[in-house]
Image: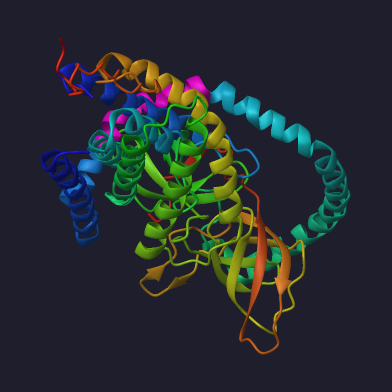
């Protein structure tokens, strides 16, 4: 990703819109007990196209903003989203996935990691009550809903970030063309 | 392959973000609610509040649409259930009217009017919900009224159906409400007319199943009895919630003959997943 002031503003606005849309809009929509969760999807999308460094920073910022806006334990979401951003970023760097439907497993996987890791962190920190089995159901529904929503979110994020990305996301790189060898069979010697 | 510089930078950024998160978590837990980070959090909520309020209004039609679709699925079974409840309510009404006369006389006898009667003197402030917690682990909502409207921490919050929670923290233009379905919440409650007392707790992830714990075993509770806030007082110690705010009805009772206490499952009156307007009882605890 080419880091300029414009890039920071662009990503910052994306994060702000994602967090506000999530807490004021999507959180109130319940489907079979679960709901869409835009936050891990946006972090995962930016990490996939921007790399692990961008993913870590965006995950941290997104989590911090969510915790600040909701009055939750400051640092819990940012810790988990940093890890999610880094993980997805490394996956993108290592595997360079080009398939058009890659958003579904990546979005689903990122949500799965986020939901369970955040649950574990919150559980360790201060939950004093019993935990209903329905938490698991809600988490699975959220992961499934997010897996489908990922197609749309990843598409929007890719479109918004395209001008500031170092390479075109999703375009498979072709191997460099081999030049013909010289008469002595030495590579690079052209006659 | 990446060169060492890139790898080092990548790891450094990860370590820095993780360290900052852990530092924030540690400091946040270590400080009092009036501390620096809590103050920053209140400031951020103050700044984001108008944006959230606008976004909430924009998304309301979408939320209503999804809610309507969900309601349509449940309408048939809900209709049968409501008919049964209506028949029961008619019977209860007849009993209640005759009990009401008896109660008036009894109230005079035992001087019950000293009890804070709900909702007299509560000065309710109506507020709109502008944000909801997206996780099951922390059941909080944000409302668009704050200290400038008389809202203070620990004041009870209700809907038209009954108790939903208490104000966790408030800034000048908005406040965070901890719902009674939050894992950390506990409400002292009593069953009427039985009089059994206990504490309402909720298992994380199941807001439809409040649990009344610490109810002594010999009590013979039955399905359908109403649970209200007890408003207990013991010397200086008093409940945050005034007596008489309805919470829900008993759905089932778990009896274990070996246990000292029984666990009572309560269906809440309030629908915690679809709250748009609430009232903060600003006069409570005066």
Q: In which quarter of the image is residue B10?
A: top left
Foreground pick, B190 / B261: B261
- Where residue B205 appears, as percent x and y from the top left, is 55, 54
Instruction: State which quarter of the image contains the N terminus of chain A.
Output: top left
Q: Is residue A190 above or below residue B125?
A: above
Q: Name the residue: 17% across, 43% down.
A: B7
User: Which residue is rendered at x = 24% and y = 20% of the image?
Assistant: A166
Quadrant where the C terminus of chain A lies? top left
Expressed as whole percent of the image width and height from the top left, the position of residue A83 reads 31, 47
Q: In which quarter of the image is residue B64?
A: top right
Horizontal side, residue B13 vs residue B182: left or right: left
Instruction: Determine if the magenta segment contains residue B186.
Output: no
The coloring applied to the image is rainbow
Q: Is residue B22 above or below residue A26?
A: below
Instruction: Name the dominant secondary structure of the magenta segment.
Output: helix
| Range covered by the magenta-colored residues | B44-59
At x 18% / y 56%, what residue is drawn? B27
> Residue lying furthest front in this view?
A184
- B136 versus A157 height, above or below: below
The single residue placed furthest to the bottom in the displayed view is B258
Name the side, left or right, on which B254 lies relative to A123: right
User: Is B46 contained in the magenta span?
Assistant: yes
Q: Is residue A23 above or below residue A170?
A: below
Horizontal and vertical percent for residue A124?
A: 37, 64
């Amino acid at each position: 990703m080419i880091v300029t002031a414009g890039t920071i503003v662009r990503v910052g606005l994306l994060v702000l819109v994602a967090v506000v849309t999530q807490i004021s809009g999507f959180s109130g929509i319940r489907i079979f007990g679960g709901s869409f969760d835009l936050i891990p999807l946006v972090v995962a999308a930016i990490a996939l196209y921007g790399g692990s460094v961008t993913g870590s920073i965006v995950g941290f910022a997104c989590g911090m903003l969510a915790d600040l806006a909701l009055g939750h334990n400051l640092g819990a979401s940012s810790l988990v989203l940093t890890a999610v951003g880094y993980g997805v970023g490394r996956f993108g760097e290592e595997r360079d996935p080009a398939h058009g439907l890659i958003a579904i497993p990546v979005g689903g996987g990122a949500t799965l990691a986020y939901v369970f890791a955040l649950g574990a962190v919150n559980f360790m920190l201060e939950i004093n009550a019993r935990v209903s089995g329905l938490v698991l159901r809600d988490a699975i529904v959220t992961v499934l809903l997010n897996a489908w929503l990922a197609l749309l979110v990843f598409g929007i994020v890719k479109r918004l970030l395209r001008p500031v990305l170092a390479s075109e996301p999703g375009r498979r790189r072709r191997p460099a063309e081999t030049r013909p060898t010289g008469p002595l069979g030495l590579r690079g010697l052209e006659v | 392959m990446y060169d060492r510089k890139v790898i080092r930078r990548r790891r450094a950024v990860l370590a820095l973000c993780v360290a900052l998160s852990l530092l924030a978590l540690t400091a946040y837990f270590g400080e009092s609610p009036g501390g620096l980070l809590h103050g920053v959090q209140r400031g951020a909520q103050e700044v984001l509040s108008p944006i959230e309020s606008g976004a909430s209004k924009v998304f309301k039609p979408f939320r209503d649409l999804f809610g309507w679709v969900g309601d349509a699925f449940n309408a048939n079974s809900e209709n049968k259930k409501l008919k049964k409840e209506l028949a029961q309510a008619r019977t209860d009404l007849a009993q209640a009217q005759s009990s009401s006369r008896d109660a008036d006389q009894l109230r005079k006898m035992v001087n019950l009017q000293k009890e804070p009667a709900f909702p007299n003197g509560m000065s309710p402030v109506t507020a709109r919900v502008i944000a909801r917690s997206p996780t099951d682990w922390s059941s909080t909502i944000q409302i668009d009224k704050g200290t400038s409207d008389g809202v203070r921490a620990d004041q009870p919050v209700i809907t038209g159906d009954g108790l939903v929670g208490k104000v966790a923290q408030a800034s000048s233009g908005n406040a965070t409400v901890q719902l009674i379905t939050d894992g950390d919440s506990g409400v002292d409650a009593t069953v009427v007319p039985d009089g059994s007392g206990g504490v309402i707790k909720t298992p994380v992830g199941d807001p439809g199943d409040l649990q009344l714990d610490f109810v002594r075993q010999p009590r013979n509770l039955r399905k359908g009895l109403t649970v209200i806030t007890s408003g207990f007082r013991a010397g200086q110690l008093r409940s945050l919630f005034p007596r008489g705010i309805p919470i829900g009805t008993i759905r089932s009772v778990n009896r274990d003959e070996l246990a000292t206490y029984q666990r009572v499952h309560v269906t809440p009156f309030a629908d915690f997943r679809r709250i748009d307007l609430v009232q903060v009882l600003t006069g409570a605890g005066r």
